[in-house]
Image (tube, rainbow, N blue to C red):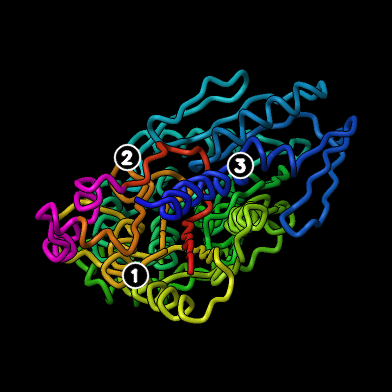
Amino acid sequence: MNVIEDKLLSDIRQLFKEGIKAVLPSTLMHKAIRLDGNLLQITDVNKNHKQIDLDYYEKIFVIGAGKASVGMAEELEKIFAKNNQKIASGIIVTPYGTKKNLELIEVIEASHPLPDKNGIEGAEKIIQLCTNATEKDLIINLLSGGASALLPAPASGITLSEKIEVTNQLLKKGAPIEELNLVRKHLSKIKSGKLLEYIYPAQVISLIISDVIGDNIDVIGSGITSVQKSNFEGFQNIIMKYELQNLIPSSLLKTMGENEDQFENSSLYKSISTNIIIGNNSIALNRIADFANRWGYSVQIMDKRLSGEAREVGDKIAKDIIELKKNLRNNFNCLIYGGETWVKVRGNGEGGRNQELALSVAINIDGLAGVQFLSGGSDGIDGPTNAAGAFCSGKTINNAKNEHIYFTKYQNNNDSHNFFKLINQLVITGPTGTNVADIQIVLLHI
């Protein structure tokens, strides 16, 4: 490598880390929450303020689920203890390997992205806590990406194994998160705001770290505290699209259709719930842009709503790189993208959407000088691998070829993980304790 290439690689790695730092629970919770005596002050991502008088409540309970939830709970305990406010108890469900021992809040580890029995246990404990809460109690719900899988509460008429198989098939067939969560909602007794049936008459305020494009609270964690329309027709269309009819009991489908509007029109449940976004992908992208500017890069945030099939998105980003490199006037340039793609599984290799996307970019920019690209998941986990994503340059494909590693074999088999592993170009952070979808960074030198 030459000096410029060394700089681009070093900078792109550090920019990714800075983006993650900006959305860690420790950062977001202390930025969003302040206690003034008995007044709980909350500020959302748009600088809107909410004030809650804790004197009104006899007890404060904490529930939550997701990849950032245990970190959020840890910070909440610290903030309350520092201000002599008492949390009665709580239950958090977090992915395996991320458990922390909290003082007042029980932490249960469960499986993600496919649910398991521990997740059911956690969901049932949360239901019981909510059921026991009274109109004089406040429930603080800490929600983040991953909650949909971590809180499986199968609707009456479907088993956990059936729910797992439906989820697995949707993941294999590359269903986007919106479709996946719509199905999860219809197979659950707590999603789509149905948890509010158990919470009532207590009040609930949800603090949410968003992993969803557009920060739609109906989609984040499948909207367990957001009353919403069931969209049974959309659910049926997804089941037909991916040919899953035989995996869901026909009796359950009939019951769902008959009860479609039973819950969604209840203003009673809407009145007890407040949902506040305290973190999202834009915060990470803006932090990256800020640091890149400080380091002398000319910065463009290209797309904050990136979505689509990973290979096709990689083709699009590569076209941006090739076109912009012809026309840019500054020596050092930074392009930033954020969102979430999906993979259409064609083979049986290892990988995730970020590694798949990075391989697509690498193929398209082969031979292009002065380019460094990185795609990574903010949670540090890309598919069923130990990598957050991968990085590449215009030399990646040729360097691999010199080692007799040919990209066609790996791309055809959805084996991007092993391609990048063999050439030592994986991004490995370990679980970050947060989740605001994915980050893509391009550094260009002309």
351 in the magenta segment: no
- Mark 1 or 3, which is nearer the eye? 1
Dot 2: what SS? loop
Q: Where is residue 374 in the image (x, y as percent from the top left)?
A: 41, 56
Tell me if residue 432 comes above or below residue 325 in the rendering.
Answer: above
Mark toward the start of the polypeptide (1 vs 3): 3
Q: Residue at x 61, y 66 (%)?
A: 298
Per the image, the residue denoted by label 2 is 116
Q: How many labels does the image show?
A: 3
Label 3: state its secondary structure: strand
Marks 2/3: CA–CA distance: 21 Å
Q: Residue 368 carries which label?
A: 1
Q: Where is residue 150 in the image (x, y as percent from the top left)?
A: 42, 43
Q: Which of marks 2 and 3 is in front?
A: 3
Which quadrant of the view contains residue 301?
Answer: bottom right
Q: Which numbered disc, 1 or 2, marks the residue closer to the eye?
A: 1
Residue at image position (9%, 55%) is: 404
Q: Which of 290 and 124 is in front in this view?
A: 290
Q: In this view, does 215 lie above or below 98?
A: below
Q: Extreme front residue here?
A: 2
Instruction: Check disc 3 and give the amino acid type.
Output: Leu
Q: Earlier in the sequence, mark 1 or mark 2?
A: 2
Q: Mark 3 points at which residue?
A: 142
Q: What element carries label 1?
A: loop
Question: Which residue does the image show at 25% across and 53% down from the upper left?
Answer: 351
Q: Is residue 290 left or right of residue 428?
A: right
Q: Crowdedness of circle 1 by 10 Å Cα count: few (<14), some, many (20+)?
A: some
User: What span is in magenta?
Assistant: 400-425
Residue pictured at 32% horizontal, 54% vertical: 157
Given the image, on which type of amino acid does mark 2 rest?
Answer: Asp
- Front-lying residue, 363 or 153: 363
In front of the other: 415 or 60? 415
